[in-house]
Amino acid sequence: MKGVSRRSSKGLVMIGVSRRSSKGLVMKGDSRRSNKGLVMKGPSRRSSKGLVMIGVSRRSSKGLVMKGVSRRSSKGLVMKGVSRRSSKGLVMKGVSRRSSKGLTLKSSDSKGAIFGKAS
């Protein structure tokens, strides 16, 4: 039910309203819960490493994610719109990825969390 709050096994999910829950921050928009955490429809999503927001500056437990600006975190580089996380490190969409063996050119990878629309 869009526009109202609802109860789920994971807790309270409010659509259209920003709020805090035991799982973290639920931002306004059409969001949903999955067994891997909070998946947000649109450019931002929640991963096991914390909340990554694209296009909005905010503080998270891992540090600051800034609009349009890349930055370093304890896990590597966070970049707007083009990056995703995998168990092997940072994967940059259509460009390259970091791995334990160094930098590898790769156009696509089925592994990792894709930043973008919730599937």
Image (cartoon, rainbow, N blue to C red):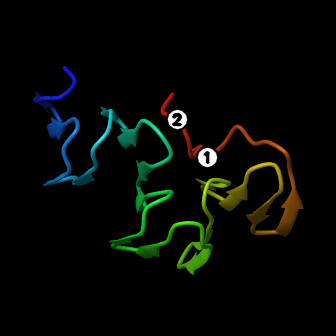
- Residue that label 2 marks: 117
- Give the residue drawn at x 43%, y 52%: 47
- Along the viewing direction, whichever of 67 and 6 lies nearer the viewer: 67
Q: Is residue 54 left or right of residue 72?
A: left
Q: Secondary structure at mark 1?
A: loop
Residue 115: x and y in percent read 57, 46
Q: Quadrant of residue 101?
A: bottom right
Q: Is residue 29 left or right of residue 84?
A: left
Q: Quadrant of residue 2?
A: top left
Disc 2 versus disc 1: nearer the observer: 2
**Residue 2 drawn above or below residue 36:** above
Q: Which quadrant does the N terminus fall into? A: top left
Residue 63: x and y in percent read 41, 78
- Give the residue drawn at x 18%, y 28%: 3
Residue 49: x and y in percent read 43, 61
Mark positioned earlier in the residue sequence (2 or 1) = 1
Q: Which mark is residue 112?
A: 1
Number of marks in the rendered image? 2
Residue 30: x and y in percent read 33, 33
Q: Which mark is residue 43?
A: none
- Along the viewing direction, whichever of 94 and 55 lies nearer the viewer: 55
> How far apart in space, not on screen, are marks 2 and 1 (Cα)?
14 Å
Amino acid under disc 2: Lys
Q: Is residue 18 left or right of residue 117?
A: left
- Give the residue drawn at x 20%, y 50%: 18
